Image: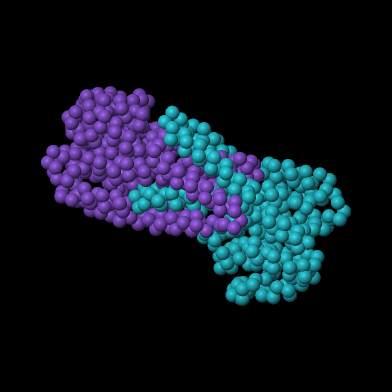
Chain colours: A purple, B cyan
Amino acid sequence: MNISEDTRPVCILGLGLIGGSLMRDLAAAGRGVYGWNRSEKTVTAAQRDGFDVSGDLAATLQRAEKDDALVVLGVPMHALSGLLEALAEHAPSVGFTDVTSVKEEVHALVTEHGLSDRFVGGHPMAGTANSGWNVTLEGLFQGAVWVVTYDNAVDLAEENDRWVETWARVVTMAELVGSDVVPSLSRRHDRAVARVSHLPHVMAEALAVAGDFGGPLALTLASSSFRDGTRVAGTAPELVRAMCENNRSSLVAALDQTLELLQEARDCLADESRNLRELAGDGHAARGRFEARAGRNKGDQTNRPIIRVRPGTAGWVSQLESAESMGAQIAIF
Amino acid sequence: MNISEDTRPVCILGLGLIGGSLMRDLAAAGRGVYGWNRSEKTVTAAQRDGFDVSGDLAATLQRAEKDDALVVLGVPMHALSGLLEALAEHAPSVGFTDVTSVKEEVHALVTEHGLSDRFVGGHPMAGTANSGWNVTLEGLFQGAVWVVTYDNAVDLAEENDRWVETWARVVTMAELVGSDVVPSLSRRHDRAVARVSHLPHVMAEALAVAGDFGGPLALTLASSSFRDGTRVAGTAPELVRAMCENNRSSLVAALDQTLELLQEARDCLADESRNLRELAGDGHAARGRFEARAGRNKGDQTNRPIIRVRPGTAGWVSQLESAESMGAQIAIF
């Protein structure tokens, strides 16, 4: 089938900021979408807003199975296991994806449940500072990167057709809500986000504590470098813990390198005969590479390569590997 | 005399971003202001913009001495020594201030030149990412903190009258251009800015390098936490080096504490039985205290105490100490 003509619905389990906003966007795009949430309050609120939402997980999954819906697991990591059990029982053939911010642990969990042949991991990189149906909004994913994993991709394997279809449906759904899809293996995703998402949070916490230790005078003299450098320390501590503690080994590696850089800077400053030339130069060049790709300010035009991919054809896995190595987004055709 | 009725001019030596913008603001406020710059190009450009600027340092200082002008040293640290020599020779009685971002080293240098009885240190905390007359602008200091040191303040000492007058003139000038004046001893200023200005730069450089090390995929997956956390790594490396290398001992102390915090976080992550509760909680609380004082976003209303001070009167030094310990701004009356 041509995936662009796919009219089967999407079934979203868990209607927090990500799942709920996805429901709003898909509905606005005219796509069939329904879902489930554990809390009765959320079910009522979503129904009042005009959405097709139920509090009955088994019934919702049975409906998804009958519709051959694409199932989206919209719950946090700790709730995934329960949903995977229900999925195995009530929807034995549907393809599904998730939206959690680490991917290797999710893949392992899915494999444990024997469901990896119909799973494609996802990570929409959109705001997570607030949570719940009440903060859901249309347009959350517009222009955001949506990582789609390809751990189970195999070139031209007949028995892989169904998985390839699920993969293409996940990509198409992400594109439908305005996201830029970037392919990645789970472990490479986790290593990358450790450096550019989890590490920045740990650094912000440490900087906030070290600045605050200077007392009221320091806080009064703090200007934009401190404001920007500590902004994400304003994130709820449980969210910071969840993202960092779910990606321990990659984050430890990133922290070890950072500790070396800072220790070297410290030693250079403690020795009058040495200077900060190396770190200041390297940091400036690194920021330059980031700006070349992502623009200087939030909302600037990004400048990423785009790789065209035809799912399931000969060589498509190596197209995905190329895209990943370039940090490219993909377009399927 | 009542300092608010002071009509003597200001003489600015060095017309880069800070000195030049100060000249624009003082002129716009109707204050007599003239200055000097070493580069002929700057002199010509400033004259073309209608300002009273000369390339003759001796003549400018002789004019300042005759006018009893308040002299502002607008040059970077490495150029201060030369100006202090010229000041001693050609303007043997004028009061003067500076605008460099560290204060202890400047105070030591001024004392070396035997000029500390007429010196009041200053640090306007306004943008320094660009430099030169061409980037000067009106309104640069509006709402910015302007630190004024009081190292030489003595309660009610007759022989101190002239110094107190210079101190009050510096404060009044900073207020005239819209700044919030915060008093501080030099060493306390340097310790504070090490934590909230220099440390954020070192952290941003290290984070930029560690993120960039993740390659193109990491840079593509980088979102606002990385963007904000590395913003000041975009500052010219020489400027970062100048600020950090001029404040070595205070910055080393701040870095040592930060290294401990990050090492502890690293160890907590490497041990599955431990967690990030402490750092995430402390960082969040610290950011909360910053936001309570400075607002959440740039341009938000600040919330600082204001202490009224009458320069030179009994107890005024302890008023300054109180203000400093609270990170308060002052108003003279």
Residue B120: percent from left, percent from top = 74, 57
Residue B308 in the figure: left or right of residue B140: right
| B34 in relation to A270, above or below | below
| B216 in relation to B275, above or below | below
| A331 in relation to A118, above or below | below
The residue sitting at 13% across, 38% down in the picture is A159
Q: Quadrant of residue A174?
A: top left
Residue A77: percent from left, percent from top = 35, 32
Residues B51 and A230: in front is A230
Residue A7 in the figure: left or right of residue B278: left
Residues B272 and B145: in front is B272
Residue B33: percent from left, percent from top = 70, 67
The residue sitting at 83% across, 55% down in the picture is B160
Residue A178 in view (yes/no): no
Residue B236: percent from left, percent from top = 52, 60
The residue sitting at 59% across, 48% down in the picture is B252
Residue at the outermost right position: B158
Residue B29 in the figure: left or right of residue A207: right
Residue A264 in view (yes/no): yes
The residue sitting at 47% across, 55% down in the picture is A283
